[in-house]
Structures are given as structure tokens and as C-alpha cells.
Image (spheres, rainbow, N blue to C red):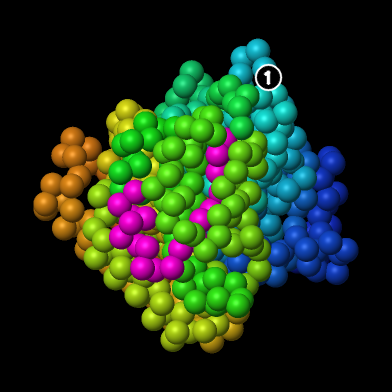
Amino acid sequence: MGSLPEPPSMHHISRSLVADLRSTMKSSKLLTPESDGYEDKIRRWADSSIKRAGAILLATSPADISTTLLFVQRHGIDFAVCGGGHATSGASSSSGGIVIDLSLMRTVNVDTVSKTITAQGGCLWVDVDIAAGEHGLATVGGTINHTGIGGLTLGGGYGWLSGQYGLVIDNLISVDMILADGRNITVSATENEDLFWAIRGAGQSFGVATSFTYRAYDQPNLVFAGTLAFTPDKIPSVLAFANDSIEAGHGHAACMLGFAVAPPPISVPILLCSIFFNGPEDQARAFFQPVLELEPLFNTAAMIPYSSVNALANEAAAHGGRKSTKGGAFAAPMRTAFLQTLFQHFSDFITDVPDAQRSLLLMEFFSPDKVCEIDNRATAFANRDYYNNILAIPQWSDEANDGRCRQWARDVSSMVSKEMQAAKIDGRIKPEMDGVGTYGNYEGDDVTFGEKGRTVFGANYERLVELKRKWDPGNGFGKGHLLAPQFDAWHGGVPVV
């Protein structure tokens, strides 16, 4: 499946209804297809996720968002919420309906006394990283800094600091949300506690998050980070180091392996190794010496501010072109033969579909210990276990290649799943955790509907269904992992008959 269509039960917004809604706005603006700036605002990270909205709300206040939510539901108009616009399912876009665009809500406030960061819902991680860094602080954030904070946070959130501080949701203190019924509420461990449990992992299904408050940590020092590239014959040596680094780094070090096509004049598939060390340079170089001495094709590792780390992969994952994402999980130590098989699979794909030369296959070697200190039932997020994530990102230009590229990503996920099952059988996964092995934020086009929501939420699924009935009984927010099995596979309050 690709970018999902709008349901036939939902309506496009007419000019007269645009005029009616515009007259109720306090400060926000409405763009229509003829407006200046409209074309820019329908752009998304993936060109394949672009849809032509009937109107775009450039939101500047929670009050206007609340008014818009009530309006679209009253008139049966399709709507979507856009933060960073990275959803390859098209969930942040609407064909003919309304997009609630949060891109003008990007204020970040840092409290150096309480060590907290409060960021509006339209912020990108670059906004948070830079604002915190100006005060010598940091928090767990995404590994690509043009990602929106909303989607990543509400789906769980892994980052370079996860080895020290856990997931993004483990450092989430509170969220201001607007519900489908228009209420503007605060959700935290002491206010609306059941909803706070739900939004930490399944937040996209419950409302529009207009503000997040995170716990911050002292980060006065530079970090050692960058990317090394190797020819495929170095796979055994680089993988041996990556496997060992998970425990040896004690949460302060991490690496990410990846496959990509080298830029000209090399222009062949290569092995990438992005590295991170939160500590002094001499200790970092000693830790990464086994890979630094392998004669990389290039090496960008250096001491840089933490606020720059999440920009390292920006160029490889730049906006534009058609894209999909699909994830999986692996248990360390990863077998050399398996990584070599994945590399061959990647190389064959690039040969078969030359249009897909910007594709990536990424493997995160982060310490899971801190993440696993919290039980899978403590939040809706159910992917805590002693394993790490793999992410396939096919990138291409020609719409005719949609099916082949998306299928490649699914094939990778299937291969990884089979390897994971083998890891369970031979004891490479510790038995005390029951993680689902599926990171919802990496599921991309394959949004899981109805009972298939168990794939992402496991034992938490039933409770989420009950909370969905309580907090969003009309399934207003259904463009993610559907938690209302009595409804059709999209939002809009259409019961299955």
C-alpha cells in the first residue's frame, strides 16, 4: 500500500465553508490553492505524500485549532495535522480537506533552573537542539533534525542520547493537547493520567499536541561525532566493533551502520558507520580506534556541539523525491553473514532500480539498557527490549517505481523479522522483556489498522482501544495506527456496517 486515499465518506471543503471558517479565526490564516504560499505549505518530506488540500490553516493559537476541529467534524470535512511533514503514509496531508499546519508555532522556552524545555507543537528538532544548546543543555531528540518533534515524540522517540536518558517519551513531562471535542487540556503524570499513558506511544490518535515540555540535561561539553565510509569488504570488522560497542559504550557511545550509494566518482554501494561519543576526544578516539584504523573512504568525525549532531544525516535524508519507510528489529550480536546478505539485497535493488540510488538502509547500535528500565506496560509504547531498530528508506523519483521500491522495504522488514525469530530461538534476546519488535514511527506507509494495531502496541492494545472510546469516541484522529476497530480504516466517525 502507498499513500492512503481519503475515505469516500469525508467531504472536500467548499469556498463558502472556507469563508465561514475564516470569519471565525482569531489570529490564524487560511490558505486556499490560489493563495501565495499554498504550494510551499503542501510540500512534504516525501513528494509521494503531497496532496492538494482544499484549505490550509496556518495555526497560531490553540483557540483557532479548537474552532477548526469542531468545524470540520460538524461539516464532515477530511482533515490532517502537519508538524514536520515526514509521514510517508500521507497522514499529514489531505486531498480537498483541511490541513492544520503547525509550522508557525515554533517557539522554544528553556528554563535553566528547572532544566526543562517547552516547545510548541510545530517545532522541528533543530529548534529544540539549538535552543537547549544555547544554555548548555540537551534532551533526547531525533537523529535527523528537520523532523517534527510532534510525530517523533508521540510515537516514542529514539535518539543519540537514548543510551543515557531513554526514549523521548521517557523525558516527556507534559503535553498541551486539543481534543476532538475542542477542549484544550494539559496531560501529565498528575493531570489526565490515563491519557498521558496513551499519548506516550500512540499520541497521534488522540488529539493535536500544541506544546511539549521535556526534561533537559547538562551538556556543556562537545561530543565526538561524524560518519565514516567503507568498502563492503570491511563489513566483518566494522560489524564486530558495532556489536561490541552496545555494551562497551555504557550508554555514552553509539553508532549507526548503513548502506548507501557513494557519490560520484565512486557511485557504488558502500558501508556507512556514523559514530557518537558523549565525552572527551581522547577517550572517544580510543573507543572508536578499531574502526578509525580501518582506512575509511572518508571520515568526518570531529568534536562538535551536541546541537549539531542531529544534522549529520540531513543531506542523506533531505526533502524531495518519492519515499517510503519500513522498520524492523535486530538483536546484537548481529551475524556477519546476515549483514552481508542485507548488503547484497541492497546492491541488487539499486542495480534493478537505478532510480532508487538515494535509498538508505540503516541499523541503530544504541544501548537499550536505559530504555529497558521502564516496563512495556508503563506507557502505550511497547517496543522496549534488548534489541535495536533497522530502517529501510527507499528513495526514488519515478512514480512508476512506487510498487517495486515499497516492496523492497517490505522485503527487508521480512528478512529482519525472520532473523529476529532465529535470535529468539538461539537465546540472543533476554527473556525478561516482551517488546513487540515494531517501532511505530518507522512503519511508514504500512499504517496498521484495527486488530493489526497489536503489531505496534502488543499487550497495550486493548487498553488503548478503551481509552480511544473515552477520549476520541468519534475517531476524529484516525490517520495513524487505528485504535477504533468499530470504525472504518480511516478517520471520520464512520462505523463499520
Give percent across and percent down for residue 30: 81, 55
In this view, 112 is above or below 257: above
Dot 1 surroundings within 10 Å: few (below 14), some, or many (20 or more)? few
Residue 391 in which image quadrant: bottom left
Depth check: give the residue in front, 305 or 98: 305
Specify whether 63 is left or right of 148.
right
In this view, 326 is above or below 71: below
Specify whether 356 is left or right of 422.
right
Stretch in magenta: 223-241
Residue 265 in view in this figure: yes
Residue 239 falls within the magenta-colored stretch: yes
Q: Residue at x 42, y 56 (%)?
A: 294
Q: Residue at x 39, y 68 (%)?
A: 232
Give percent across and percent down for residue 486: 37, 55
Quadrant in which the N terminus appears:
bottom left
Residue 94 falls within the magenta-colored stretch: no
Give percent across and percent down for residue 20: 81, 54
Q: Amino acid at mark 1?
A: Asp
Specify whether 411 is left or right of 5.
left
Q: Residue at x 51, y 33 (%)?
A: 282
Extreme residue in the right direction: 36
Q: Which residue is labeled 1 in the image?
A: 111
In this view, 42 is above or below 349: above
In this view, 306 is above or below 476: above
